Structures are given as C-alpha cells and as structure tokens.
Amino acid sequence: MNEINNVLICGIGAVGSIYANKINEYSPENLRVLVDKNRYEKYIKNPKIFNGKRLDLNYILPDDKSFKADLIIIATKFNGLNDVIKNIENFVKDDTIIISLLNGIISEKMMAQKYGQTHILHSYFIGHSAMRKGNIITHDGTGFIVFGVLNPEVTDINDKVLVEKFFDKVGIKYKTPDDIQRAMWLKFMLNVSSNQTSAVLRMNFGQMQKSVKCRKFLTDVMQEVVNLAKAHGVKNTDSMIDEAFASFDSMISEGKTSMLQDVEAGRKTEVEIFAGTVIELGKHYNIPTPYNKVLHELIGIIDG
C-alpha cells in the first residue's frame, strides 16, 4: 500500500466522533462508519450532533462486502471490542492498518489474536474529555492520537509512516513517541487513577485538582501502576507520576472523565480494563494492589 485512502471507523462516541467528523470533512466518499442495524436506524432517524453540526456519515453494516479499508480506527468502549473484532472481518485486507483508541493496555493484544501483529499499531487518544449528552457531543479540539510501533520485528514500520502522512493530509493532530510502551503505560496510569476516582467520588477535574486529599489518593493509586510497570519492563518509570499529574492538571476544571460520564448516564463502566487489569497484573507479578481492589469493588457496586 502506497497511501491510505479508505477508512473505517468503529464507534462514534466521545472520541470516535472527533475523527469521524474530521475525516468526513476531508473525504466523505472514502469514509465508512461501522454500525449494527439498531444503531443504523437510530443514527439515521436521530443523527449525532458534533459541536452543533449534524454528523451525516456513510454508515456500513458488518455483513457488507463492498468496502475494504486501508485504515481501521477503533474507538468503541472496551465492552464492545470483542464484537468489533468479529464485525470488521469483511473490511480487512492483507495490508489493512488497525489502530485502537480504546483506554487500557490490552486491546492490541486482543486484536492481534485474530488479525496478527503485522499491521496493528499501538495507539491511544489523549486530550480534554468530550462531553456527551444523548446524541449531542461537544469537544474543544484539544487532543491528539498517540501511536507507534511496539516491536519493529513483528509490526511493519512503514505503517507508521503511512498513518503520519494520512493524518497530516487530513489535519489530525498526533504524536509518535520514541517509546510507545512507556507512553501507553503513562496514559493507563492516568486513567486508572483519575477515571476511577472520579467515578466513585462524582468529582470533575477541577474538584479533584483542588483537593489535597484527593491528590494524595491519586498518587497512591498511580504508585501501584508504577510498581507493575517496572516489573513489566517499562523504562524510566521514576518520573511517570509527575508526568501524569502534569497532564491531569492541564484538564479543564469543568471537564469530567469518561467513566464519570458513564456513571451519570447509567452506562456500564470500563472498570475491568482499569482496576481489573491492574489486579490481574498484580497477581502475575506478585505485587500488592490494594487501592485498585477497593476501587474495583466500589465501582462494581455502582455498576450493579
């Protein structure tokens, strides 16, 4: 493949809608948004509104065989990932590049079990939270996709170049750190601490930022992730907490984490990819994770 043209997006919630809107503005004829039949009927009848503008998109159903993607961007919630892995099958060709903007650190491994690691880039979204209320999504434009090649021996390094060129063409902001593994663990640590704490305490970023006791609690939760990162072989872990707080303090005060928004809307949370993953890794490396065990229990009660 010489360049990326056809793009498939899976999930047009708080993150996916940002990039569906961006690519649709650039080249709507080359974009498809994967939905099931229920969502297709829902979105046609009641379109998403992104920053005050209707999102009129070209939707496609999983059984359609008329479209092959050069790039697939997965932006669903974690509880929808297994369905997405199955539903993208008709749109994957030998050189299709797949990136996942899901929270956590395990989605790439799950996708590689079916599609191999050759064309799967490690990636995530970071920035200000989009605010979602019903079909209305608002975002201030502060955010970017971080991506890279974890292991050039198993993943095609040219895929990174192709995605860079496509993002430059479309106007999508991105970063490509030298150490994508460390970058992903840093984002994971930020999510494990701030998302879960906000969901339990029902606090927005500003309230958490101003609370000395909350910041101490966040530090303790982060330290569990740092301990696991060291055991996992992540480099330069000593400065990770300070870097995570720098990102945390840059969030707009009235903003809410995605998990708090899920709790307020009565949606199931992503606690399993946060505390659940930390607890499992703690068992694997024989490292205590008491703060995440408590958060797991409390959020499990909220989820019902």
Image (cartoon, helix red, strand yellow):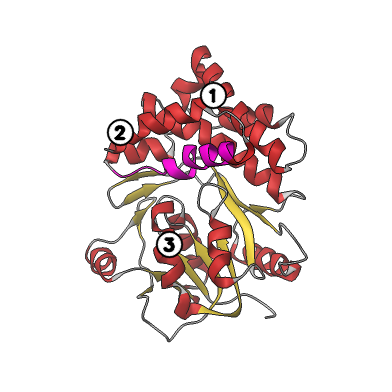
User: How far separated are the C-alphas under marks 1 and 2?
Assistant: 20 Å
- Front residue of this view, candidates 168 and 7: 7
- Residue 267 placement, left or right of 214: left
Reply above or below: 213 against 49. above
Q: Which residue is mark 2?
A: 302
Which residue is pictured at 53% across the width and 41% down the height? 280
Total numbered badges shown on the rendered structure: 3
Q: Which residue is mark 3?
A: 82
Mark positioned earlier in the residue sequence (1 or 2): 1
Can you tell which mark lies on residue 292? none
The residue type indicated by label 2 comes to: Ile
Q: Secondary structure at mark 3?
A: helix
Q: Secondary structure at mark 1?
A: helix
User: How far separated are the C-alphas under marks 3 and 2?
Assistant: 23 Å
Question: Quarter-wise, where is residue 282 in the image?
Answer: top right
Looking at the rendering, in which quadrant would you find the N terminus? bottom right
Residue situated furthest top in the rendering: 212
The residue type indicated by label 1 comes to: Leu
Q: Which residue is mark 1?
A: 218
**Magenta stretch mostly in which secondary structure?**
helix
- Front residue of this view, candidates 130 and 289: 289
Disc 3 crowd rating (10 Å Cα; few below 14, some 14-19, many 20+) is few
Reply above or below: 268 against 197. below
